[in-house]
Structures are given as structure tokens and as C-alpha cells.
Amino acid sequence: MKRAYTDIPEGQIHYRIEGSGEPILLLHMAVSSSDEFSRTMHFLSKKYRAIAIDFLEQAILTRRLTHTRFPTMRGR
């Protein structure tokens, strides 16, 4: 499985691609990522060129949550 990025005007989008043949595009749900298609892509790649992208909003959300500090419940 190849993992790469492509540039678009809004930033970079991460994608995964595996196999050859007719392309099939896999779109993840809102709070997920292309990682959920790892096993599926392996199966589909025997007949298709499976492509899974991470939505730009998901990458931005993940980055924000990673750098956000949430208040703790200490002192209660």
C-alpha cells in the first residue's frame, strides 16, 4: 500500500492507494480516517485500484485536537 500526500489550494491531503485496474474510491465517515480501510483495500486491490483519502477537515481537526489542552479534574 502506498501512502502519500497531494497538494491542493487549501493544503495537503493524505491518501492511500493499492492495486491496479478500475479505480474505486473509499470515503471514510466524518470522525474517522482512511486507516479504517486498511484490510478492505488489501482485499479490493486484487481486482481494483483502491484509493482512500483523508478529508482535509479531518486532518485539520486531528491537528487541532492534538495541540489542544483540555482542563483536568484535579482538585475535586
Image (cartoon, helix red, strand yellow):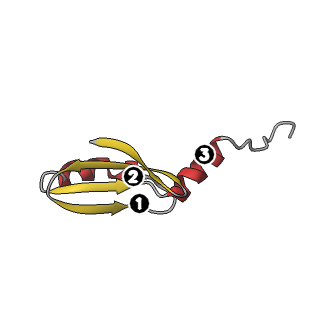
The local crowd at label 2, few if under 14, some if 14 to 19, many if 20 or more residues have their Cα within 10 Å, is some
Q: Residue at x 74, y 44 (%)?
A: 70
Instruction: Tell me which label, 2 or 1, sits earlier in the chain.
Output: 1
Q: Residue furthest front?
A: 9
Residue 53, x across and y down, in percent:
39, 55
Left or right: where does residue 4 sit relative to residue 49? right
Q: Residue at x 26, y 53 (%)?
A: 40
Instruction: Tell me which label, 2 or 3, sits earlier in the chain.
Output: 2
Asked if the residue under mark 3 is in contact with the one under mark 1, i.e. CB atoms within 8 Å, the reply is: no
> Residue 54 is drawn in which quadrant?
bottom left
The three-letter amino acid code for the residue at tag 1 is His
Q: Where does the N terminus fall, quadrant-wise? A: top left
In front: 4, or 65? 4
The three-letter amino acid code for the residue at tag 3 is Arg
Residue 26, x across and y down, in percent:
32, 61
Q: Which mark is residue 34?
A: 2
Q: CA distance from mark 2 to mark 1?
A: 6 Å
